[in-house]
Amino acid sequence: MSAGRAATGDARPGRRELLVSGAKALRLVWRAAPGQLAGFSAITLAGGVVPVVAAWLTKIVLDRLVAPGPIGAVVGLAIGLACVGVVNAVLPQLGQYLQSEVDRRVGLRAQDELFAAVERFVGLGRFEEPAFLDRLRLAQHSARSPGQIAGAMFGLGRDAVTLVGFVASLALISPLFTVIVLVAAAPALVIELRISRQRAETMLRIEPAERWRFFYSELLTTVEAAKEIRLFDLGGYLRGRMNSQLRQTNHAHRVLDRRELGAQGALALLAALVSGGGLIWILVSAGRGGFTVGDVSVFVAAVAGVQGALNGLVHATAETHRLLLMFGHYTAVTGAGRDLPSPATPRELRPLRDGIELRDVWFRYSDDHPWVLRGINLSIPRGATVALVGRNGAGKSTLVKLLCRFYDPTKGAILWDGVDIRDVPIDRLRARIGAVFQDFMAYDFSAADNIAVGDLTARGDQGRIEAAARHAGIHDTVTELPRGYDTLLTRMFSSDSIDGDPQTGVTLSGGQWQRLALARALVRDERDLMILDEPSAGLDAEAEHDIHTRLRRLRAGRTNVLITHRLGAVREADVIVVLSGDEIVEQGDHARLLAADGVYARMFTLQAAGYAALSGEPG
């Protein structure tokens, strides 16, 4: 299966893929818990021998009791039978403990490897594919399945040992009836395997509905949506949509449950008829002197044991099959590889000397989407501030995504001092870029950690953190918080205070979060390129002026790309680039573009007139 198909999971896995998944699962379990796995396997297989031994000891004891002889031998056999009973009682408890320990260790290892694989998706494309997101959720659900797969496989071994022992015992009494019991179990295996495949396919089919249900539940329980939901009285509407998704998934599960109920009922009736007929036959034969009491006990135990072991084999096979199908989502994600190609011969990325050039750059998100950028040619000189302006959807943010190499151009190239950024390792490129995005994150961390995530080397360096906060104009606000920079900026969690009492965090206003996000970018201010995507969108006019004044002073002589809809903030930019209709239609400084009386001049005049009207001054 190719990486692309593996990521989206459209193809039905065949026998070879299931075997590969099984081998990967066992290797993962062995890496995570080798000692526990060895102990669990030994206990599980021993559990398959104990019932057979107990049946034969019971036969011998009964035959000795009926036949004349010394009682001492019977006492010894009874003690042995009691010991077997104790072992039979202890083994499942010990096995369950080891199974749980295997699951815990494997769950930790599998989760770590899954998210390490997700980290290798260095672009954004896969996170915008619904099919991949569905598979990713199923992969997370399957993170503990390797331990369960190992348990199911060893369960197969245990039931196989039990089956062999009881089949041999039953064959000694009646070879014909042995064949009847085995043949009667064949339909169960076929039906269970079919149901397990249908369950796995149903899980993938209903995953979009599950994701929608999760989305609605998040809306109904998060503070971000609480204001609008209550003001607009959306609770009942969203709850109805959430319940509709749950009804869809319930219906799919109900159909499968009914099929399984009918099949299991028919199979149970067949098994009861076979065992009942066998019991009548053995009792009649024993009454005629054909079998001893011990033979009857072994026959009864063997029939029950064979049917039980066969049922166990069938269920374990079906469960292993289902788990392997589900684990296929995990192996598909972890084996999908990188989403953006790595350079075959990586080139060194030196500090920016000349500038960045976009050369005939075209971009669209897929062949089915329209062009977002068409034939973009743009130079970003070192030390210059280049402002990107234009209407919503003009391609400004997409251009920034290409500069950060979240996507690669569909056509054309982006050059860093003449070096195509596709020929440079992505981590080295991004290490030279700082950014504050319009849709910045508000992490449920402390104020200090919210800043330090911009450059993890700043963690613990209070001087760097406070300097970034001062440059962003948020230092005084943070110091006034209950625990200063150690204050948790969320009400979703609590932190332990110095005296051990839990303290609920605090929330910031939108403008304060905007400044904190700016501090996060400024903590890596020494980077060659700073991208400022609407850095003052959540601020009032005075705060906006303050931020841009600070940025001009701090970033003077360094390379900056600024995106903003407030054209007053770009007047001092070295180059203003106007995007419209997916193309660059104008570029130059403020005075030149005003003199040209084109798109920029009309946009600027319109905004200025709006501000003048608000202030009561003549336009």
Image (cartoon, rainbow, N blue to C red):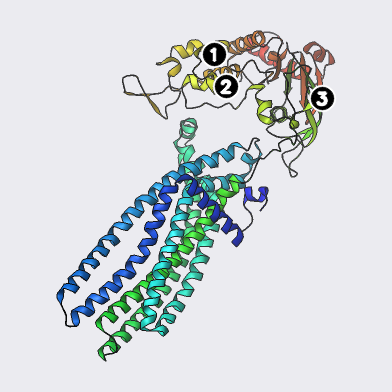
Q: Earlier in the sequence, mark 3 or mark 2?
A: 2
Residue at 49% x, 51% y is 146
- x, y (%) of residue 139? 53, 47
Residue nearer the viewer, 536 or 268: 268
Residue nearer the viewer, 310 or 47: 47
Q: Residue furthest bottom?
A: 288
Query: What's the residue type where badge 2 is placed?
Result: Asp
- x, y (%) of residue 540? 58, 15
Disc number at residue 464? 1
Q: Earlier in the sequence, mark 3 or mark 1?
A: 1
Dots 1, 2 in contact, CB < 8 A: yes
Q: Quadrant of residue 372?
A: top right
> Which quadrant does the C terminus fall into?
top right
- x, y (%) of residue 329? 56, 50
- x, y (%) of residue 529? 69, 19
Query: What's the residue type where badge 3 is placed?
Result: Val
Query: What's the residue type where badge 1 is placed?
Result: Arg
Q: Earlier in the sequence, mark 1 or mark 2?
A: 2
Is 543 left or right of 444, judged from the image as shown? Answer: right
**233 up-or-down from 335: above or below:** above
In space, the residues marked 3 and 2 are separated at their CA atoms by 36 Å
Disc 3 crowd rating (10 Å Cα; few below 14, some 14-19, many 20+) is some
The kind of secondary structure element at disc 3 is: strand
Residue at 41% x, 23% y is 505
